[in-house]
Image (cartoon, coloured by chain):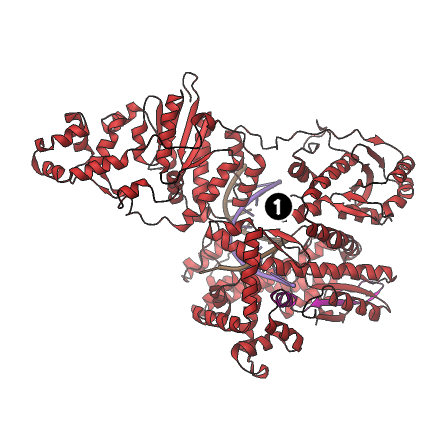
Chain colours: A red, B purple, C brown
Amino acid sequence: MSDSGKPTLLVVDGHSLAYRAFYALPVDNFSTKDGQHTNGIYGFLSMFVNLVKAEKPTHLAVAFDTSRQSFRTRVYEEYKANRSESPAEFKGQIPLLQDCLAAMGVPVLTKEDFEADDILATLATQGIESGFHVLVCSGDRDTIQLVTEDVTLLYPSVQGVSQLKRYTPDAVVEKYGLPPENYPDIAALVGETSDNLPGVPKVGEKTAVKWITQFGSLDALLERADEIKGVVGGNLREHLDDVRRNRQLNRLLRDVELEYAPEDLLIRPLDTQAVRDIFARLEFRTLLPRVFEAFDATDEPPAPEVAAPEPQQTDADSLAAWLAEQTGELALTVTIAGGLPTRVGVATSDEVHETAWNDAARVALAPWLESDAAKIMTDAKPQVKALRRAGVRLGGLAFDVLLAGWLLRPSLPDKNLADLVDRYLDEKLPEADPSQLVPETEGATPGQLAWFSLRVAEAERDELPASVSSVLDDIELPTLGALADMELAGVSVSRDKLSGFSGELAARADAIAQEAYGIIGREVNLGSPKQLQEVLFEQLELPKTRKTKTGYSTDAAVLADLQDSHPHPFLGLLLQHREATKLRQIIESLSVGIADDGRIHTTYVQTGSQTGRLSSTDPNLQNIPIRNEESRRIRAAFEVGAGYETLLTADYSQIEMRIMAHLSGDPGLIEAFNSGEDLHRFVGARVFGVEPSEVTSPMRTKVKAMSYGLVYGLSAFGLSKQLRIEQSEAKQLMLEYFARFGSVRDYLRSSVEQARIDGYTETIFGRRRPFPDLTSPNRVLRENAERAALNAPIQGSAADIMKIALVEIHSDLRDQGLSSRVLLQIHDELVVEVATGEWDTVEQIVRTRMGDAADLSVPLDVQIGRGSHWDEAAH
DNA sequence: GTTTCGACGTA
DNA sequence: CGTACGTCGAAACT
């Protein structure tokens, strides 16, 4: 606490404290899902936040070393030379920690050629002169010399960084028997092993203190060294130069030139959004409120609630009349209850109108709603669906702020208008508190939501590059309309087929479980990884496997490996049990999802991926099993609906490799696709130098894995693991592959390099994905980003192509008055429900539109199948 | 009651 | 040490 009203300056040695935290906290508990270690960051911030909360400094800074080199290593090159290189896992955390501090508004100080402690010493010295009370927090004992009546040192105890010991002058005297300014004398005599500074042999703290007390100063001691008797006296005389050198090196510099004076370090308000973003990236959850509390910030954005114009409540006819007079773009919000519209709000930049939805409103407003008059909306799909249920097909959808926000920043979790208002307008959308029965604050009305949408749209348009804007106009907005119809249509699923199968599986799982219990002599929950670990590694004493956060892995790959090395009947049963219960779970969730119309209506999340793909939820229909005979019985339950004749499935074969061929321009790969030969056979023939007819099955498997791996940024290590071959063989395979298909490697390399320069990748159609981490000094982050950046244009272009085809097919079917309709999209596959007598026409439309969706240097091959259920229609 | 983790389904 | 997703039950938290 600041005494006598003095301002308090807290200066912290970031490096030494983070380093201690790094070793104090188990890395397993502190790493993100993409493998970034965060234990040092977390430990430091946790300590730091407690410190700020307890000490309430008015001024604040954190200092870091720039490297191991400093003026001290130049004076004495052995300085700290005994220290092993700090682990890469630690080094990588420092830039991220500095990012966190920057977001928190805390100045980060570094100075080339100096150590963090010199910065602390300088700030402490200047702080005293400027009338501060100074708190120095460092894990380096040399900082004891800074302690005065005005400077307190907070030093981490052996228990860890969370326990800080306070060193005042009295506390230093108590511990070392001498005042703080003499501490470096003691240290010089004793030496500092951690800094590789040898002292006088046989001289410890006790002797050093005795000598300094006796002679009054180090200089006096050194001058009169011949007065010391015995072996230690001899030692001292032999090491006078070492002591002088130590004393020179452990003196902290108090006059380093810095960017900031203590007065400049006044605590600034933290950037709540930035802190939220970086903590989300580091997967810190509990830390967030603690930071906000310590820094007296509210978790809510500080943004003001900006008053929207008062909505004018009108009847539908008046609204229709007003709408007819408008010429510019309008924003529209339709509120929904029970899947149907309840109110309609419309806004210009200075007017807000709204009306209730009813039959009269439908009749009055339908002409405008269905017209091409431009409309700006937020998350239009549910609203489009509600209107269609009410018999109105919305036209003129010109902008969706949610889609635009996603196109601009596909990695961000912005999922509603409130998030976007915060991000793009830095304002707060008025929201009623749902926990209150009678909310104190009124939420925005439909018209006001539209008004905010309009303003967010304007802000987003300022940011949208032309290419991304065209993705919005030409791909995403039309796709939205097609998805709305697909969701409304749903897919017919047979309850009977599912429930029959579910019963079988339940019985089978039970039988397997009983048999497994018999083998191990007790009943355990086979679905519990924890209990399984007990059985496998303790009871059965099988070798421990890959580590996870909470123990040892029991996943299928691990169990298969175990089965190879230590065959045990329990392992096979466990795998079978897993398979049966998994299938049953899937069936159960599907059954629950069958609506009253006998169909499953999934929801496609258009903003659900970072690459441009769709995702599917409630239930997810994009991960229905297919790989084995058993699981195909689930697909067989997806049937053609009443009133329709058959299901059509259409999928792109090897679309990602085709895009790779196009983007790389590799002559060999292009020839492969133009030859009509099986791709992997063709590639195998080239790689292994044999005729296509001589490509054996293992050869084909290898090049197939390699080809697919390329798209994902596969390494020799990963390839060897996947194929269960030696790493050297995998390396050789990659070499042979690239010797024949060199342009592929060139392309992959150059595309990542380009992304590093631009900061983003781009699909063939201009969809962008930012990759800030490509220039990260942190290797884990950078390499993860490199693989994702390699994949993004390929996966993303494939997604674009499928969306374009989907939109064309959807509109062809409607324009030609056909009843057939698209039901599902599974990334590279479409499922269409074909009406009686429409097969030939529909097949033609699907084949042409998918084949022509993009003009690549290789053909887009489309496979079409037909059947009364999904499994039969697959080929 | 809610969140996280391990496991696993798809392209 | 292979990209992109969503969902489940159990465990761990509130």
Q: Quadrant of residue A188?
A: top left
Q: Would residue A451 be seen by someone viewing this image from the given angle?
A: yes
Q: Which residue is mark 1?
A: A412
Q: Is residue A149 left or right of residue B9?
A: left
Q: Label 1 sits on what residue type?
A: Leu
Percent of width and height locating residue A177: 22, 26
Q: Quadrant of residue A229?
A: top left
Q: Is residue A644 magenta?
A: yes
Q: Is residue A752 magenta?
A: no
Q: Nearer the viewer, residue A872 or A22?
A: A22
Few, some or many residues within 10 Å of mark 1 (<14, 14–19, 20+): some
Percent of width and height locating residue A250: 27, 35
Q: Nearer the viewer, residue A831 or A364?
A: A364
Q: Give the mark count.
A: 1
Q: Would residue A569 be seen by someone viewing this image from the given angle?
A: no
| Residue appearing at x 37%, y 27% in the figure | A124
